[in-house]
Amino acid sequence: MKESYLSELEEYRVGPENDDIQKFVEDVAKRIEDEFTRYEEYHPAILGRNSGEKLYRLLVKEKPDIVVETGVCNGFSTSVILKALNDNQRGKLFSVDLPANIDELEDKERSGAVIPPGKRPGWAVPEELRDRWTLKEGNSYYELPKIFENLSHNIDLFLHDSGHSYETMMFEFSIAWYHLMKEGFLLSDNIDFSDAFSDFVEAKKVIPYKIGSLGLIQKKER
């Protein structure tokens, strides 16, 4: 595992600072964190305020038409993406999530991405932003191919934030890359969990960057 890989990456330049998105990100994060105060043994699985702001600014700068993400959980990054698409007045988001509700867990020691009892994936997403969103619940190995098959053209941006095993990350990177537009972006959270991101970068011979805690690569013409 290349534990220092993220810190070695150059920061990708995104759009200018935006006070409005800072407040939006803070509000969504606080809503999720407040819900988890009664479940202190579990982590709210928030991407991070800084990363959320930078993701928003990238999306506003690039104005994608089709975004695909895996790993919705409570809906922090989903909210940020949908906020950007709404502000752009264009674009659709297709999400895949395999939910793990706290009250349904057999392994009560699990500390990863979980959803509070009685909630569904993306419960924190503001209602007024949901018109541009399609959510598929299930394993990305099954649901991602279906999404790509049903799209009329390739995607502009992909965000991986589901299971972070080497195998899952490589599967998602590979299928997303195949369906990614030229000049499109592939982003991944937790790139230090395995060598998947660095191995994929090496195989595709692209330059890796970071925005906040996310790894980023762009599909350049050869």
Image: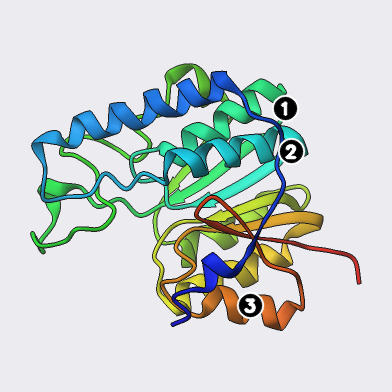
Residue 65: mark:
2
Please say if the residues under marks 2 and 1 sit with CB atoms less than 8 Å apart: yes
Other residues around mark 2 within 10 Å, as few (<14) / some (14–19) / many (≥20)? some
Q: Quadrant of residue 108?
A: bottom left
For badge 2, the amino acid type reads Asp
Residue 65 screen position, x and y as percent: 74, 38
* Mark 3 secondary-structure assignment: helix
The amino acid type, in three-letter code, at marker 3 is Phe
Amino acid bearing label 1: Arg
Q: Are marks 2 and 3 in contact (CB under 8 Å)?
A: no
x and y percentages locating residue 149 in the rendered image: 66, 57
Q: Quadrant of residue 172?
A: bottom right
Alpha carbons under labels 2 and 3: distance apart: 25 Å
Residue at image mark 1: 90
Foreground residue among 128 and 201:
201
Look at mark 3 in the image and give the residue it sits on: 200
